[in-house]
Image (cartoon, helix red, strand yellow):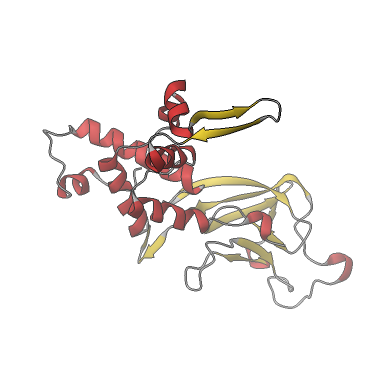
Amino acid sequence: MAYATLQQIRDDGLTEEQASDDRVNELLADATAYIDFITGMWFEPRDLTVKIDGSGRAILPLYIPIIEIIEARVDDAVIDSGNYVVYNRIYPDDRVNPRVVYKSVDSSGGTVFTGASAAKWKRGLQNVELDGTFGYTDFEDPDYVTPQLINRACRLLVFHGVPRISDYEAQSEQQLIYATGAIKKEVTDRHSYELETRGGGETSSAVHRETFGLTGNLELDGILMKYRSLRPRYAEVV
């Protein structure tokens, strides 16, 4: 599913004479895939079974925001849902720190897990399986929806034209020399050289943007970098 609709693009002013419905839908799909690639997340509910390494601790950090956990299993054994808490809140916001945490008491509320029996996610490689719905979304009762800024970014990408890595790789050697600067001066015995900056900073900036996957549109790049910075920091959760 795309993060914007054909009708929204038409409402934004792109006519059928400028691009057919098929072409717009193709651009929407490209834009959605590009947003996922740049941000490292997705922005719609997706039903998945996630396999993750057991942490050996009460806290099981995830690398994707949680909407709902249907069932958790460790080494194929189902874990009672009353024995853990899913951090999937939007207020306060758990989307940048999603996790599943064992309670210190069992589901009846009567037994405290202590010592050797303390509840922990058994350490292992992909030994924990979580069935559920995942994705970085906003909540509009009763639905989980794509954030408005991501919808905006998708529409901007359709009009901008989705940049592709192949566009950068397809540049000729001559163009790259022009962008980075030709050798203006060289001292061979001391192995030094000086680059001539032909074409000024604009060309270099264009190569810089394409190298890092940016578009050059300040509004669009600002949205993409905002959500890239908000993606779950799995490696930082301890």
Count of numbered circles on the image: 0
The answer, for residue 215, to whether it is visible in the render is: yes
Image coordinates of residue 47 in percent, x first then y, are 49, 47
Quadrant containing the C terminus is bottom right
Direction from residue 2 to residue 61 in the image, left or right: right
Q: Nearer the viewer, residue 238 or 218?
A: 218
Q: Nearer the viewer, residue 59 or 36?
A: 36
Q: Nearer the viewer, residue 194 or 108?
A: 194
Q: Residue furthest right?
A: 116
Q: Residue furthest bottom?
A: 110
Direction from residue 225 to residue 189 in the image, left or right: right
Q: Nearer the viewer, residue 12 or 66?
A: 12
Instruction: Name the residue located 39 percent from the left edge and 40 percent from the top edge.
Output: 200
Instruction: Name the residue located 60 percent from the left edge and 46 percent from the top edge.
Output: 50
The answer, for residue 171, to whether it is visible in the render is: no
Instruction: Name the residue located 78 percent from the left edge and 75 percent from the top edge.
Output: 111
Image coordinates of residue 230 in percent, x first then y, are 51, 59
Image coordinates of residue 204 in percent, x first then y, are 43, 39
Quadrant containing the N terminus is top left
Image coordinates of residue 88 in percent, x first then y, are 53, 64
Direction from residue 122 to residue 128 in the image, left or right: left
